[in-house]
Image (tube, rainbow, N blue to C red):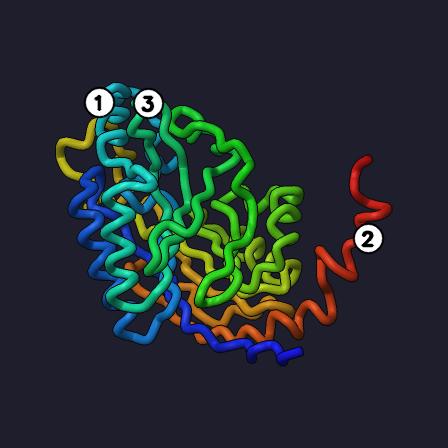
Amino acid sequence: MEPLPPLPTIRVAAVQAMPVVLDLEASLEKALGLLSEAAGQGAQLVVFPEAYLSLYPSYAWAHLPGGDGNALWERLWASSVEAPGPVVDRLADACREHGVVCAIGVNEREAERPGSFYNTLLLIGPEGLLHKHRKLMPTHHERLFHGVGAGDDLGVTETAVGRLGGLICWENRMPLARWAVYQGGPQIWLAPTADDSDGWLATVRHIAIEAGAFVVSVPQFIQRSNFGDDFPWPLPPDTEVFGRGGAAIIEPGSGEVIGGPLYDAEGIVLADCDLRRTLHAKRWFDAAGHYSRADVLWPR
């Protein structure tokens, strides 16, 4: 039997950025530029925020009454992404050019059935679309915008940069959703989010320990100046920042923050992730293996 190949060290980039609001083409161009910039700094895995293409309906403004709901819905749908589709193809071309894997949050629409759209995490490599996951449960006001995921896409994808899995924002609080992904033995956990709280940082640090995986947490930095004068929804008065960010990369086992957190600015957080650390962490605690006790704890 041939020995297993050594586990590599992967340079990961958490890209904290705000899209060009409701402008898919401009947001995509910005994403391609940021992907190139991250690759130029040696990144092999580049992770973007939740609903980066092309707007996350943040509670910081979306809960306010008085907007033109139909106008916002139309523009959200028009700036959403089909997967597979031409936006995915362009991102895959960029991944091929730079030799990287990209994870990016999008509002996903279905070309064959105009209507509902979904909060979706896309995983894209030089080969094209590797995996997509639709958020299981939109949170509170998000239910006015996003459909509910079917849950048939929870899993881990084997890639050139390791075994990648993860969940979107507050799905990461759902123990059974985490458990479903843990079954695949993730080495790097993707956690795009809109949460900039201390509680969120505690959540992703816990997941790094529980999963025995590096966690890449990537929110948006959301400013009033990103919204145009024609934005069809009222914004809170006297508020300049709707999301402080907090991009961070967390080490398995210890839950140590090894990159970031970055607050109050756009930027790229980098960390070198030695995948041997995931094996060492699971030696001590493997939630889906020797420490699972599913035989007595799993519902029957």
Q: Is residue 58 visible?
A: yes
Q: Could you say where residue 134 lies in the image, as x and y percent from the top left?
A: 46, 38
Label 1 vs 3, first from the N-terminus = 1
| Discs 3/2, front | 3
Residue kind at label 2, given as amino acid type = Arg
Q: Gap between marks 1 and 2, in whole Å? A: 51 Å
Specify whether 209 is left or right of 91: right
Q: Could you say where residue 283 lies in the image, as x and y percent from the top left?
A: 72, 71
Q: Which residue is mark 1?
A: 71
Q: Gap between marks 3 and 2, in whole Å? A: 43 Å
Rendered image: mark on residue 113: 3
Q: Could you say where residue 38 lies in the image, as x and y percent from the top left?
A: 29, 68
Foreground residue among 194 and 198:
194
The residue under the point 40% across, 37% down is 119
Q: Within 10 Å of the Cα at label 2, are there few (<14), some (14-19), or many (20+) other Cα atoms?
A: few
Q: Quadrant of residue 73?
A: top left
In this rendering, the answer to whether 6 lies above or below 195 is below
* Element type at mark 1: helix
Specify whether 148 is left or right of 24: right
Residue kind at label 3, given as amino acid type = Arg
Rendered image: mark on residue 293: 2
Q: Which residue ends up furthest to the left in the rendered image?
A: 229
Q: Within 10 Å of the Cα at label 1, are there few (<14), some (14-19), or many (20+) other Cα atoms?
A: few
Q: Gap between marks 1 and 3, in whole Å? A: 19 Å
In this rendering, the answer to whether 297 lies above or below 17 is above
Q: Is residue 244 visible?
A: no
The residue under the point 79% across, 37% down is 299
